[in-house]
Image (cartoon, rainbow, N blue to C red):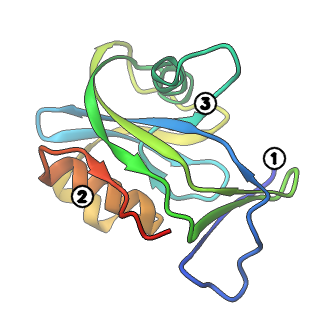
């Protein structure tokens, strides 16, 4: 398996984006916990999610990716936001793809299933909200989680370009 390397805001080592591929993720909250994964490709904690496949809606992508990565089936209940920062690129070393960030995060509730790791996640847990600030996490993921926990309005990227 290749690695995932995130680059942000003018990092001198950042490669140029060579693709844009929509992805979807979920913010799943249960009481004072959030469903999070520890990614197998970089060791960072994040909300479950992944790339959109042909033939499916983006909403279906969010539900499918959450099930695949966590073992938990969810029902979508809203939108956390649209995250398309052109200064955030993700380099996938397995195929040398460098994607510009393009992620829609949905609000979701658990329906059934227990947290179970997959090939994409080494750990899957209901993480206490108090513990989240102490987890190793990419800044983009931290921003998304902070927004989900503190705002009732959807996040919309600034129209800077």
What residue occupies the far bottom of the structure in this picture? 12
Tell me the crowding category of disc 3: few under 14, some 14 to 19, or many 20 or more residues within 10 angstroms, Cα based: some
Residue for badge 3: 118
Front-most of residues 121 and 17:
17
Residue for badge 1: 1
The picture places residue 34, in percent across and down from the top left corner, at 26, 40
Q: Residue at x 53, y 79 (%)?
A: 9
Q: Nearer the viewer, mark 2 or mark 3?
A: 2
The picture places residue 159, in percent across and down from the top left corner, at 40, 63
Quarter residue 104 falls in: top left
Q: What is the number of callouts on the image?
A: 3
Q: Nearer the viewer, mark 2 or mark 1?
A: 2
Q: Can residue 107 be seen at all in this image of the molecule?
A: yes
Q: Which mark is residue 146?
A: 2
Whole-angstrom CA distance, mark 2 to mark 3, is 25 Å
Front-most of residues 142 and 35:
142
The picture places residue 22, in percent across and down from the top left corner, at 59, 39
Sequence order check, earlier mark of 2 and 3: 3
């Amino acid at each position: 398996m290749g690695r995932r390397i995130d680059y942000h805001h003018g990092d001198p080592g950042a490669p140029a984006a060579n693709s844009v591929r929509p992805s979807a993720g979920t913010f799943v909250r249960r009481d004072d916990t959030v469903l999070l994964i520890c990614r197998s490709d970089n060791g960072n904690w994040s909300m479950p999610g992944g790339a959109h496949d042909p033939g499916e809606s983006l909403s279906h992508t969010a539900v499918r990716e959450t099930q695949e990565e966590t073992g938990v089936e969810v029902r979508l209940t809203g939108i956390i936001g649209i995250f398309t920062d052109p200064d955030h690129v993700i380099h996938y070393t397995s195929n040398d793809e460098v994607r510009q960030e393009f992620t829609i995060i949905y609000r979701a509730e658990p329906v059934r299933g227990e947290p179970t790791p997959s090939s994409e996640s080494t750990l899957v847990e209901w993480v206490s909200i108090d513990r989240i600030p102490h987890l190793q996490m990419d800044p983009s993921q931290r921003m998304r989680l902070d927004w989900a926990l503190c705002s009732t309005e959807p996040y919309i990227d600034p129209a800077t370009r």
